[in-house]
Image (cartoon, helix red, strand yellow):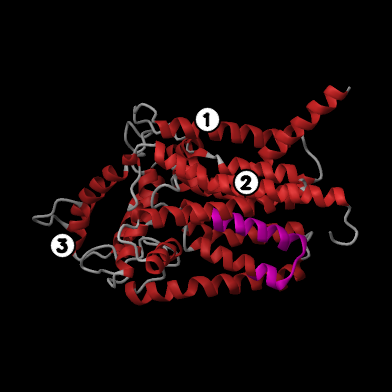
Amino acid sequence: MTPGTTEDETRVDRKAIAILIAILSAVFLFRLFFYLILPKDDFDLGTDQWLLTAKRWVAGDGYSLNPQKTPTAFRGPTVVCFFAGLLYAFQPDDPKWTILIGQWLLDVGTALLLYFVALEVLKDKRAALLASLMFAFYGPGAYFSLGGWSEPIYSFILVAFALTLLKALRQPSAWRFGAVGVLLGLAALARPLSLYHPVLVLALMLWALRWNVPRVLRLFPCLLVAFCLVVTPWVIRNFLLFDAFIPGTTSGGFALYNGNTGLGEDDHWRFRSSAECRDLLWHELEEEFGPAPGVDDLSSYLAAKGINEHEADKFYKASAIESIRSNPYRYVVRSLWRFIPFWFNVGYGRGEPPSLHTYIVLVANSCLLMLALSAFLFFRGEWVRRGVPLVALVIFTNAAYMAVIALVRYSVPLAPLLMVFAAHTLVSLWDRRNVLRGA
């Protein structure tokens, strides 16, 4: 027992630690249970090429996606390096369990970090424990830890960034904002959207430091230097390979096209699948560069024409921007509508029956958003100012995705931040119930 600490306080601390350990164990066990009961056809460890790139890298084929060992920048290195590190360290014959357990342990780390984020904002151990517990049994988050997705590592980095940012804004220092910059760099190399987060941090610094511009100008460069140190090796590598400035990936153009193609069509409200977009782009490229005999898909067409992925990405982006410029009103309407599929996995306009995954997302995120909103409507307090950075991070990231493409998996890393406020609502309701019962 430390000096100045009562025996009761020590007992409470020990109880909180024991509960937190139990919650962290539940994070892992729930994902194992989830994996065992759900149909295995739903999960593909090769999803979106992160693991495939890692496998080829570890096998000595370079940072590539195809048997020709063509260098790629289609996926950023943070997730690929994580997968490659697991494969190199354990060298499994079947990577399934190595990758799954690695991601589940990351989720354990996210739950632990979330506890400290909630404690930083709410100053209430009960709410902090409840926020971690909500994350442990959050179905959409568990679902995306069962394949080769980027969600587990990006969620971990984003929550770590949120915690570091909260502490840096409360106790500004060069090294704290440097740490924020390092985490933002890692986040940007996992999801290129985070390349824009330094702008948000700058706005939050001006707000937190009450427009003390000289002080902001002394501290913000620390963040920028750390951020640039992390992303610069990737930028240099891409410049040497593609002779172009690529701070993120070569998949951004396709994402913009995927989210905004068909704005001029009668069924402009319908979301096009990736496969449909690849076919559309193949035909658009044929109109621009002519046909290529003997090809049967977009990838083989690009190879036959000698178009590298950066050049293809520029074409996709230009086509998407042209569609947006030609139909600005429909673009705005579609962007606003994207809030629905982003959080609830419905509203794609495909006429498909809801899947089990959709029901899980719909129930979980509906409850989460209502509870988080209730905290600000009915249970405001001193914590509101401390929670502003989290709210700004959620709104900024959500709005950026709505402007480009809104798939439900992009909402998963933001959900833990909302759990902080949802936990406060539940604890406040419990306290109010006790007060009413006592009266």
Q: Can you identify the residue that label 1 sits on? A: 363
| Distance of label 1 from label 2 (alpha carbons) | 25 Å
Check the image and report above or below for 245 versus 371: below
Closest to the observer, 107 or 46:
107
Q: Can you identify the residue that label 2 sits on? A: 22
Check the image and report above or below for 379 versus 306: above
Question: Measured from the top left, where is residue 137 in percent x and y?
Answer: 55, 39
The local secondary structure at tag 2 comes to: helix
- In this rendering, does residue 346 appear at all? no
Mark 1 in CB contact with mark 2 (< 8 angstroms): no
Q: Residues within 10 Å of mark 3 (few under 14, many from 20)?
A: some
| Distance of label 3 from label 1 (alpha carbons) | 47 Å
**Disc nearer the start of the sequence (1/2):** 2
Q: Comparing marks 3 and 1, which lies closer to the viewer? A: 1
Q: Can you identify the residue that label 3 sits on? A: 304
Check the image and report above or below for 198 versus 12: below
- In this rendering, does residue 86 appear at all? yes
Closest to the observer, 336 or 58:
58
